[in-house]
Amino acid sequence: MPPLRLLALAALAGCTTGLDAYQTVKSWTTPTDPAVDTTPTSTDTTSTGTTPTTTTPPTQTTPSTPTDTGPTTVPWANGDPLDPPDYATPPTVELAAACADIGVPAELDDDEVDVKSHDDNLEVRTLTSPVAGWYELYDVEMSHQGTGEWNESAMVRILNDTSWLGAPVVANCDDQWVAVDPDNYGEPGDDLFYLGTFWFDAGDNVLELEHACPRIRAGSCPELEFLDDADTTCEANDGNSAHLDGEQLCLVAPAP
């Protein structure tokens, strides 16, 4: 049997080993302070006492529907100077209709205006419009001489505070619309004749009437010159006078 002293030493050694093991396990299993999780979490404001943030949705407006109440009101979406009519088809050059049935009369400060091929090829007048907007301008035919003069062609510009240059929406010669002599193959008529689509201010506008021959002589749009009669070409010394009837001007709203 081992001596009592040896047994005591062995027991003491075993207790020390077990305490060390216990302290090692305890130090591994004792949780430390957890790291703070900075990942934001969604808060269910319906189950907490926090006041929810209210987001106001954008106001929904019901678009208005244009109403055609007659030719004296601004038709369709016609009131935007930056949004001219977009012609899917060319405008109607001649209308066999009375202005009162299809449009609005406009007033000119002269009963008649005429321009000639060489001298006196530009005239300026005041046109008074009862409405503002994009309108097609019609008058009775500019030509009156039939085959006596083959190039009674001219162009109109409408200038005002909104449209400083007065250029038409549709052009057939540079940036201008030339109303081409219509009566070379028939008698002069009284149908309404298309002069261009313009922006009109309500009230006074400046109307410029310019003969087409100076522009043609300068090399623009030669296809608009009639060469059937050598005595009345744009080069010939003939008047080829083109006229406006100041009492027949008519504003017609473009088709929507």
Image (spheres, helix red, strand yellow):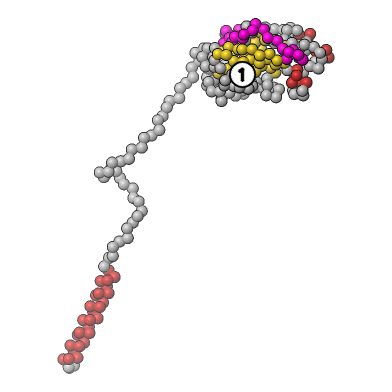
Q: What's the residue at 57%, 7% (across, down)? A: 100
Look at the image and say whether residue 250 sits in the magenta stretch. Answer: no
Q: What's the residue at 30%, 61% (across, down)? A: 34
Look at the image and say whether residue 116 sits in the magenta stretch. Answer: yes
Quadrant including the N terminus? bottom left
Residue 96: image location, x then y, percent: 64, 9
Residue type at the position of mark 1: Leu
Figure check: 232 above or below 175: above
User: In the rendered view, does 184 fall on the left or right side of 159?
Assistant: right
Q: Mark 1 points at which residue?
A: 159
Figure check: 55 above or below 15: above
> Which region is colored magenta?
98-121
Q: Quadrant of residue 235?
A: top right
Figure check: 172 above or below 20: above
User: In the rendered view, does 56 fall on the left or right side of 201?
Assistant: left
User: Secondary structure under badge 1?
Assistant: strand
Whether residue 241 is visible here, answered yes or no, is yes
